Image (tube, helix red, strand yellow):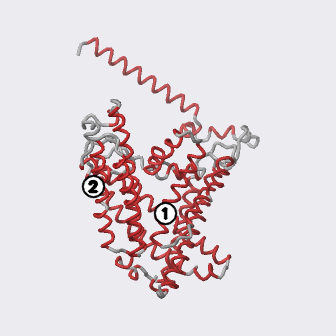
Amino acid sequence: MSRKQVTQTQTQTQTQARTQTQITTATAQDSPLTESFLHPHAWLNDRDHSYAVHTLIRESPLSSESNFINYRGFFNLAALVLIIGNFRLVIENLLLYGILIHKYPPSKYLLAPLLLWGLFGLNVFIIIAFVIEKLASTRKTDNVLSLLRNLNLACTLCIPLGTIIYLDPPAVSGMLLAGLSCNLWLKLTSYALVNREFKRKAEAQKNKVDKALVSVAYPTVEYPDNLTLRNMYFFIVAPTLVYQLNYPQTKKIRWFWLAGKCFQVVFFFLLMIFMVIQYIIPSVHSSVSSIKEGRIGHALERILKLAIPCLFIWILGFYTFFHLGLNIVAELLRFGDREFYKDWWNSTTLAEYWRKWNMPVHNWLMRHVYFPILRLGYSKPVAQFLIFLLSAIFHELLISVPLRSFNLWFFFGMLGQIPLIMFSEKYTRASQYGNILFWVSFCILGQPILILLYYQDYHDLQVSHRGLPLDDL
């Protein structure tokens, strides 16, 4: 280093030192706290009896006009009260009922042959759908193939549901099979509609692939090269209900991340089973007589008692399936788009909740129902009503068929939300009151009422028609 450079370095160092000294001096002069260290009691000279305390226009921290936003202490208190209150309920439940989980072995609510048939038997409809689309790609529009396609879709839904009605398996097994069949029907419908659309575009020489959807590390697939069993089963297993020729993909599988998510799935799944057996079943079981006798006060007490465990189980179920389960499948398949839900917990209307909480179903309905209805010339309210009607039908199928309860409680419950949706869209949209109305109507009251109504029907079926003792329910 030359002498000139050394001199410049020393000058810069001295300048920085003088600047720091000036900053420290200014801070000490402006800050009473710093001044108190230099002159311990000097700042008290201006704090006599006439010292002006009220010099600013200020709002109370809890006032709506205040900009105060730190309520962490109240949140801690609310969490503490919630934990203590629920811990008391745990102790009360154990003292009253004891440990109940040993009374409900898996063989009591799971029928293994039926579930195996669901996992492997449904492959028949998958293969048939693949063969139909393979034949359709090499032929012009064929009415016979269109008829076979529709017939296969109808059988995909009707045969499993008919099997449930005929065999009358345990309710849990029936719900699982009904869920698998409905899920497969949605997927095969999307598979048929998309391939039919691409066939028309290919005939019109408009078959283009959006390469922005696919990572550069993976080649794009064009119609009809997508019609392979590998592509078909990738879509069947993928965490989506809408078929595309190409999906965005990640570069690798994070195995340690995957192991952590699998552990969480097992833990939360067992926790949900424990809560259902220990809390839900005893509460609904003891409410049958009060509902039959029309004791409104006791029934309301049962509803409120069910509200908290139902809410916990519902949130755990959402987190286990939509967050953990679908992310595990996506990670194994390197499926890139993982927006399986949005911030439904901030919903201020029920319509907003239904748009956000289940994005795979929402995307399917928008792509294959909502926009086609609009293209036919119908208005948005008509399209929205038809979507809500279709959703209500499928939710009812998932519950009514396995429970053999055909009072349509879920169907009318969903349609009954329409006036509430109209009210909230007009008066409480984007407000805190709308969010409170959502939680109260949907979770605190809606879910426990539906559970009690369906259990009432299930109780009548098991006891009155089959002669089973109450202890065997």
**Would residue 431 be visible to someone looking at this image?**
yes
At x 56%, y 70%, the residue is: 407
* Pick the front one: 97 or 215: 215
| Residue type indicated by callout 2 | Ile
* Pick the front one: 324 or 350: 350
Q: Quadrant of residue 27?
A: top right
Alpha-carbon distance for marks 1 and 2?
Answer: 35 Å
Name the residue at the top extreme: 4
Seen in the picture, residue 30 relative to 441 is either above or below; the reply is above
Q: Badge 2: few (under 14), some or many (20 or more) residues near its Cα, within 10 Å? A: few
Residue position marked by numbered label 1 in the rendering:
314
Residue position marked by numbered label 2 in the rendering:
127
Label 1's element? Answer: helix
Q: Position of residue 450 (x, y in %)?
A: 56, 68
User: Which badge, 1 or 2, is on the more N-terminal residue?
Assistant: 2
At x 51%, y 56%, the residue is: 391
Task: Give the foreground label among 1 and 2.
Answer: 2
